[in-house]
Amino acid sequence: MKNAEIIAVGSEMLTPSRVDTNSLWLTDKLNNLGVEVVAKYVIGDDRARLAGTVSQSLMASDFVLISGGLGPTEDDVTRDAVALALGREQNFHAPISDAIEARFKKMNRVMPEINKRQAMVIAGAEILSNDRGTAPGQWIDVAGKIVIILPGPPHELKSMFERECQPRLEKLLPPVAIRTLQLRISGMSESELDQTISPIYKKYENPVTTVLAHNGDMQVHFRARCESVEAAEALLAEVDGQVEPLLGDRIYSRNGDTLEAVIGAKLLAKGQTLVVAESATGGGLAERITNTPGSSAYFVGGFVTYTRKMKTSFLGVPEELLAQYGAVSKETAQAMAEGARKATGADWALSITGNAGPTTDGEEAPVGTIYVALAGPDGTEFGHRVWAANDRLRVRAFAGQMALDMLNRKL
Amino acid sequence: MKNAEIIAVGSEMLTPSRVDTNSLWLTDKLNNLGVEVVAKYVIGDDRARLAGTVSQSLMASDFVLISGGLGPTEDDVTRDAVALALGREQNFHAPISDAIEARFKKMNRVMPEINKRQAMVIAGAEILSNDRGTAPGQWIDVAGKIVIILPGPPHELKSMFERECQPRLEKLLPPVAIRTLQLRISGMSESELDQTISPIYKKYENPVTTVLAHNGDMQVHFRARCESVEAAEALLAEVDGQVEPLLGDRIYSRNGDTLEAVIGAKLLAKGQTLVVAESATGGGLAERITNTPGSSAYFVGGFVTYTRKMKTSFLGVPEELLAQYGAVSKETAQAMAEGARKATGADWALSITGNAGPTTDGEEAPVGTIYVALAGPDGTEFGHRVWAANDRLRVRAFAGQMALDMLNRKL
């Protein structure tokens, strides 16, 4: 298997708030070509330091991809550093300069003299055209190993890689078939999920397994890399056959669809509608449902009832009930859901009440307490959890996930 | 100024979905000590490759921080790689082994023999205690340069760095005073903001300026690093004196408070309340307002009116008005805000109606159209924008920002 290293160039990438995302995208592309990424770097605008890194990477790996540092200023050191590392000259390439000049003219501007630096090409390099910006890339064969220079802005880099690099790499590399099985999972914790499936996936180096978790919503990706599509699909079917019985109905989608999209499709198919009434989640449940394009076909709307008066006036929650059980209670959740269903005529109503913290006003349930109710044609169901997490945003996100998971199972 | 390099170790950090966040946190800590980070690396579980990187970094910089690869298995190569790079022996340290064994016992488990590898210490190293996990760190003085080995899990790394490394680094480094001016800005685009203030901040290498933008909400951080607090504060005052007149009331906070928190504080001070009525943003506006702890003191609640019937039933929007102007119109926005205000008795009502896309149902305004209305004690004001961005989530986020910005200016 061939190896690659990825170098991001630019002192601005070394600040506490910046992440090199180009390397993540490139890693995915390279993995799909059967190339493993074995090291990544972020190097500041320092010619000698960058030249040293390029030399070392080129000794260790088959491909070295460098992004950024191709601008026109003195701070843009990539071309010079690579030329230095390879011990090669750079030559002025008039057609590049003309193209940059034309780009400036189109914007009614005159090309500054300094931009001519972007037309310098390392001896022996193939030029990679940039259809989104001024700086061209370069593809340099160094005794069978390849150095690839790409621009830093992600939209320029992606377009250049797909148009100019992908075809060249496919020619150099043995054909490979990649197939991915993507399971989305709800209703268990990340550690439960991992304990359940790790005995399976640890048996396999191929497919590669990735587990992603976000506030109770989880994804497992199995990526098989084989010589043929048939072999990759057979391998995934083999793994699926072992994982599926262990997860059962906790798998809510197999095509990347979100939980709210799966619910939406089920409601559409049944011609049914949904309303929500939320206090603790403050609109977050409605927002998540309406993230799905076309949700207006089944989502009636929502009530964010942050006061007792909102609950009594619009959802018909009796004042006595609130006084007796408190706003954070199973009884209030029930009254909210049934009230919202009645007030709007929707087929289903989901309600959430709870205390997301960070403090409680004394009369209320402890921080992290959530009650969910789902009112439907056959009555009302309930969910209840107390999360230990003293993190308002996480408690809110977990509560929304729990409510949607309940509705999805019911549908 | 002293330089540092940061190396993250672990093949799992070289997948398309993983980002090394430890280095961001460490960069912030190091910058605050007056140390500049000049290179970052992610290296797979490869002893020789890691040893080469450590050697190179140690030649180039004063501090080399390495995180991860301290587990008990053969894949955990950090200790061996650093020993190899420095040409030093490792010695078994019984007290570490005893402490790990005690940790296992506390969990009613027997320490596997393999965990003894975690008690190997490089000759001459100081041991950095781990109060959150089994693997200790190491602090190695190499002829005045320092190699620091830290565990990979962020909560272990952060605790160890703050307890064990920060005091050691403060002793080695000249005292430095850091002060930050943090402006939060709304009501202009990121490029407008940068064009406005870049002539100022480009004049200064100190303070360092960082501009962060997220869906129309922006932050500018100026970080001054001086020998005394007075000098740092004077420097920030000098920059502030030039930036403030250019931005004026587009600066909504100077202490890190979010726009919704600033609005909340103003409402609290006036003893006033707020209600929202939203369709295009689907609950997102209410969610954002309720992200602020304590928002129940001024936020009455919200209506997510995703159907015409929700608008007529609960907000009293006249059916004729909807028929004449359409749901996405200034008139509907006005009726929603005024209706919500009347129905709840809140002092202020914000409404948003629009089409976030990706498609339009023909009768509606084009994708990206947003109308905002703000109804208050003195009447109703309006906002209107058509965003070109064909990105549902972004249009929704921009619309919420616009609505909150309007309310904040009014308050």
Image (spheres, coloured by chain):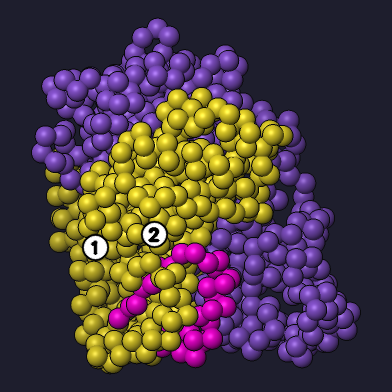
Chain colours: A purple, B yellow
Indicate the secondary structure of the residue bearing disc 2.
helix
Q: Nearer the viewer, mark 1 or mark 2?
A: 2
Q: Earlier in the sequence, mark 1 or mark 2?
A: 1
- Name the residue carrying label 1: B159
Whether discs 1 and 2 lie on one chain: the answer is yes
Q: Which mark is residue B410?
A: 2
Residue under the point 16% across and 41% down: A360
Type of amino acid under label 2? Lys
Q: Which residues are magenta?
A: B179-208
Residue under the point 54% across and 86% down: B199
Q: Chain of mark 1?
A: B
Count the marks. 2
Q: Position of residue B186 (x, y in %)?
A: 46, 64
Q: Specify whether residue B206 is painted magenta.
A: yes
On the rendered structure, is A228 left or right of A209? right
Tell me: residue B183, above or below residue A329: below
Give the quadrant of residue A356. top left
Q: Position of residue B409 (x, y in %)?
A: 40, 62
Q: Position of residue B204 (x, y in %)?
A: 46, 89
